[in-house]
Image (spheres, grey):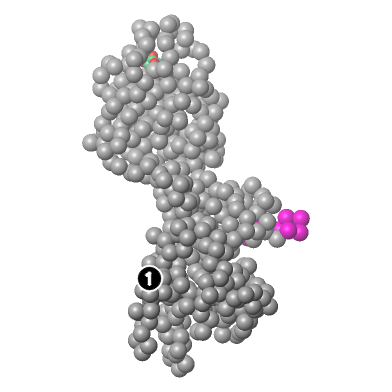
Amino acid sequence: TATVAIVGRPNVGKSTLFNRLVGKKLALVDDRPGVTRDRREGEARLGDLEFRIIDTAGLEEATEESLLGRMRAQTEAAITDADVILFVVDARAGILPADRPFAEMVRRSGKPVILIANKAEGGAGMAGAYDAFSLGLGDPVPLSAEHGEGMADLFEALMPHFPDPNEMEDEEDDPNKPLQVAIVGRPNAGKSTLINRMVGEERLLTGPEAGITRDSISLDWEWRGRPIKLFDTAGLRKRARVEDKLEKLSVADALRAVRFAEVVVVLLDATIPFEKQDLSIVDLVEQEGRALVIGLNKWDLVADQQGLLKDLKEKATRLLPQVRGAPVVPLSGLAGSGIDPLMKAVFHVYEKWNTRISTAKLNQWLSEALEANPPPAVSGRRIKIRYMTQVKSRPPHFAVFGNQLDALPKSYTRYLVNGLREAFDLPGTPIRVSLRMGQ
Ligand code: GDP
């Protein structure tokens, strides 16, 4: 579950907000006077959001300098643990100098922050709420923790930081569930030969004597104790004559195989690699959001294996920027070599495809990325990116929040995608980024 920290100078009403979110009864028990606590934590609930909440208010009554120092240390610790920060100010008092060091800590963390103008019951303290803009922490959410007003707005502000339960309903990563792998490629790339070799029986007939329709479209296999369902496109077609194999790739067949799969092996004929059709198959895999491995088949026919591999890896980087880093594995279906490295790559990209990155880590990365290369101003519009969160995996999908994002150049989104791929080591998986305006 996500962790939310309540941060702010003494007396802005952090404890009251904590109590409101945790449920008064429970918190009051903890709240005996005279009990010194450096930190309170609780299970909070707001609407259908459930999260862990940390209160930094334990020392509110403290007046001594040393206690203020301790409160700062405690705030730092809470910020470190948090995925989202609620920064509380007193709307009636406005922004005081004492607010600033806490605001500074929050800003430095680069974590998503929701600015709260508390004590705004009945619309009081609007001036203070406007004042709060000057902290540079975004639009304040006016509320009254004591009277329970504005909690719906707080919910609205918090919600984007929590994974959408519908979107997050990914399949469990159950090791007993077969991994669905499709092997796609142009006719004659050697798909059937490879699958025959993997499955270890002449279950799919291939070669010049073809003319057989296979009955099943997917095959159960096992690699190192992991169950696998293999799916190939060639098997869908009746091969009446050898000439049929010269027919062009059926996009509908390829699409069906890709949609079936979690991981797609795009099989190239290493002697004629990266033909136009190969590139469009890779595009398809990317568009459908599947994990990708590139297999270089017929490696037994290659004379200068080292030279060609180097050359083809460079080509892959250049021709397939949208799936940068996808593994490129030489193999020979005919000789039965390279199947182990291929399957290792398949499981590796599958793991990457399932990656989940915590909001805290993402935003730490984001603040560095923004600093290294700030979004440009486009025709006088100042684009501001505030934070991001992962909304989905399989493939990894991130939502970026900010202002004026409709003006954000495509090249900047690419910069973010490439940076994410690099920083979180996500080769061979498509990465999705959606831009969302407002808090
Ligand atoms: P598919 O259309 O992709 O299923 O291709 P096939 O598996 O039917 O293979 C097409 C032709 O390439 C056949 O004549 C195979 O014997 C040959 N072939 C397949 N894999 C290899 C390989 O690794 N090395 C060599 N030398 N030939 C291969």
Towards the viewer: 282 or 357: 357
Residue at mark 1 = 42
Q: Does the magenta segment cover residue 5?
A: no
Residue at horizontal 23%, vertical 36%?
Answer: 225
Left or right of 131, for residue 415: left
Viewer can see residue 336: no
Q: Residue at coordinates 45% horizontally, 89% vertically from top-left? A: 61
Which residue extends farthest left? 225
Which of these two is toward me, 108 or 82? 82
Question: As shown in the figure, which amino acid type bears the numbered disc 1?
Answer: Gly
> Residue at 49% across / 41% down in the picture?
430
Majority SS type along the magenta span: loop
> Vertical placement of 202 versus 172: above or below?
above
Horizontal side, residue 68 vs residue 410: left or right: left
For residue 229, which quarter of the picture?
top left
Which quadrant is the N terminus positioned in?
bottom left
Residue closest to the far bottom: 64
- The one nearer the camera, 404 or 423, is 404
Percent position (x, y) of residue 435? 60, 51
| Whole-percent x, y for residue 308 in the image | 45, 31
Residue range of the region highlighted in magenta in the rendering: 374-381
